[in-house]
Amino acid sequence: MKHHITRADALAALVIAVVAGMLAAWPALDIARGLSLDILTATRWQAFGPRSDALARPAVVVAIDEESYQTPPFKGSPTLTWTREIGRVVTAILDGGAKVVGFDIVFPTSIEQSQIPFGDEPLGARMRGFDRDFLRALAAGAASGKVVLGEIGQRGEAIGPSPAQRVAVRQQSNIRALNVYLDRDDVVRRLPLSFASESGTLPSLAVELAARARGVTPTFKDGRLDFDGHTVAGSVPNTLTLNFDGGADDIATYSLADLRACVEAGDRDFFARQFDGKVVLLGTVLNVEDRKLTSKRFATGLEGARGPRCALPRPAASADQFKRSSIAGVYIHATAVNNLLEDEPLVEFDRWTVTATAVGFAALVAFAALLLSPLAAAFAYLGLVAALLAVATIAFARSIALPLSEPAVAGFAALVLMVGYRFVVVDKAERFLRASFGLYLAPQVIDQMLNARKLPKLGGEMRHVTVFFSDVAGFSTIAEQLAPDALVELTNEYLSAMTDIIERYGGYVDKYIGDSIVAVFGAPVDDPDHAVHAVRAALSCRERLEQLNTSAAAFRGHRLSHRIGLNSGEALVGNIGSRRRFNYTVMSDTVNLASRLEGANKYFATSILASETTMSLTGAAFDWRELDAIRVKGRLQPVEIYEPIAEAGRTTPEQAQIAKIYAEGLTCWRARDFEAAARAFAEIAPRDPPAALFHERAGRHVQHPPGEAWEPVHTLEGK
């Protein structure tokens, strides 16, 4: 149901849009805002794929992975004992030209500190010097500013490197926090830029690594980062909004086991080829340890160390590998480093901009819901959401995070509220009008009244239509035999069935005159196929009446038959009557001829007759036979009349034979060969009432030939 907008309705739509937009951008619903990043990360990946080759990006990961745990000398050894081998790999990486190595794994103790008794002294005393090579590697890297250890800040004392490691890297100057920022739904979409410490504000690990790789000093002010002349500021103060790629190969990853074997093999060129100029992060990439949900959760893949190999063969894919929504924590920091060095952190809009966008989107949906039917408005809402998603995905490919969830939520709220407003306020009058006048006027007429938003007035227009006129044969006799209530039941049953068929084919019932029906096809709604639909309705009405005669309780004991006349032509349609009372109706000679054709059925003992005009407009849709040329009361010009046999392709062989013989007889009749006409009509007269009528006429003319002025036109004296 469409609706024209009034000022009150427009104001209501605007108020609903503002309320819905502000509600959607309410801070308590920021989970929806985070969901926007998750959806856009996935749609961008599906639409555009990875933004660049992982090997060409600044940050790479050295993974303590499942392969490392299964490969000697690490196999069967606690991670605490891996430090010497890790130190050798770190040294090889730095010698290969890496700009800086960051540790996303924390070794808070050393095996040298173990107090477990082992013989006459603690195990730590017996292992003294075990970490010496590891500490030397850390010290050498820290001296040149190329090693940064990580620590996890928490209330109270932080979880950080062991004391010896802290000394090796010159204490806090080369230790940075690994903490991430969790949204309310425990999803990592942002990373802190800095942390407060006793020595002042210190960058996070990722910021520190990127700054050392670029050779700049990061500065912080009012929750923003000045990085090499670029300002980084997330929607949450002091955070960087992470710009994840999709899939599992966006960060080049190398297995610690393979790199350790590469050191053993002395392949220094491999380290130079893979790590020269890179920021290297060492961390765990395991199925169960240090997993985080991120805005990449809908766009993940099978993780693995799929970087180039040096010494060990690539392991076969494990049967227990599966795609999961979380990623290893080290990839969060690697992504942040890439974002900073490639100048691609996500740009989010402030809350006021998001609110304005949500209000604007809600306004579009609200006005759509005001103008369209609820179903059409729902489809319009889905279309607008799809368009918004497409635009937002394109913008996201350029690292701009347009609001998505907030407008979608606001639009849905506006749709629901606007449909409710229409139901309670706007459409109440329309529903009343339809309920009140739907029994008197055609639905199309009511629609015109509602769309015009004004009272109907006198007036009409000429339209090309087909008029349908029907009457029940012998109804007066039937009426005399029935009680009033039975007559009403019978009449209502008949008129209801016929009206349903007429309206099904697009006709408009103009009026009922007792048992008669006057209907028009082609008005008030234009219908270029009005003649086809009128004939199809007439055939269906005839078929339906046969069914009612055998099955309807009201028809029991009273077999009805009806006559239908069809005529096409120009007619005046519109509101016609007095200034105080009028009807939407149709009037012209076209209507009168349809009425005369309905009456002509009684002379030919037929049920449906149509004018030549109607027949010619139907094309090849039906099989016809011409019955005669007649002159009806009130018209001097003869009219050729036709009977529709059936829809094209549904005529039976017997009907086709009768039509053929009848046409031969009619040709002879018009040629004044009455003997031949009588023979032809006699052949089918027992089966065809019109043929029996013509057989009788031809016989009379054989006995008493007409004069020269005779014409093959039958004049009907009555209606």
Image: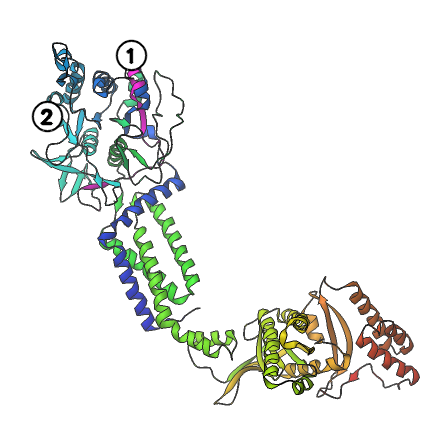
The dot on residue 364 is none
Crowd band around label 2 with a 10 angstrom C-alpha radius: few (<14), some (14–19), many (20+): some
In this view, 330 is above or below 15: above
Residue indicated by mark 1: 264
Residue 160: percent from the left, percent from the top? 15, 28
Counting residues from the start of the chain, the first of labels 1 and 2 encountered is 2
User: 669 left or right of 209?
Assistant: right
Q: Kindly tell me whether residue 467 is visible in this rendering.
A: no
Q: Kindly tell me whether residue 309 is visible in this rendering.
A: yes
Q: Amino acid at mark 1?
A: Glu
Tell me, yes or no, whether the highlighted magenta stretch contains residue 124.
no
Q: Which of the 4 image quadrants contains residue 347?
A: top left
Q: CA distance from mark 1 to mark 2?
A: 31 Å
Secondary structure at badge 1 equals helix
In this view, the residue in front, 137 or 299, is 299
Q: Which residues are magenta?
A: 235-261
Residue 332: percent from the left, percent from the top? 26, 34
Which residue is pictured at 13% across the width and 45% down the height? 222
- Image quarter of the N terminus: bottom left
In this view, the residue in front, 358 or 123, is 123
Q: Amino acid at mark 2?
A: Gln
User: 83 left or right of 540?
Assistant: left
Secondary structure at badge 2 equals helix
In this view, 700 is above or below 106: below
In this view, the residue in front, 69 or 190, is 69
In this view, 661 is above or below 181: below
The dot on residue 171 is 2
User: 307 left or right of 539?
Assistant: left
Tell me, yes or no, whether the highlighted magenta stretch contains residue 251.
yes
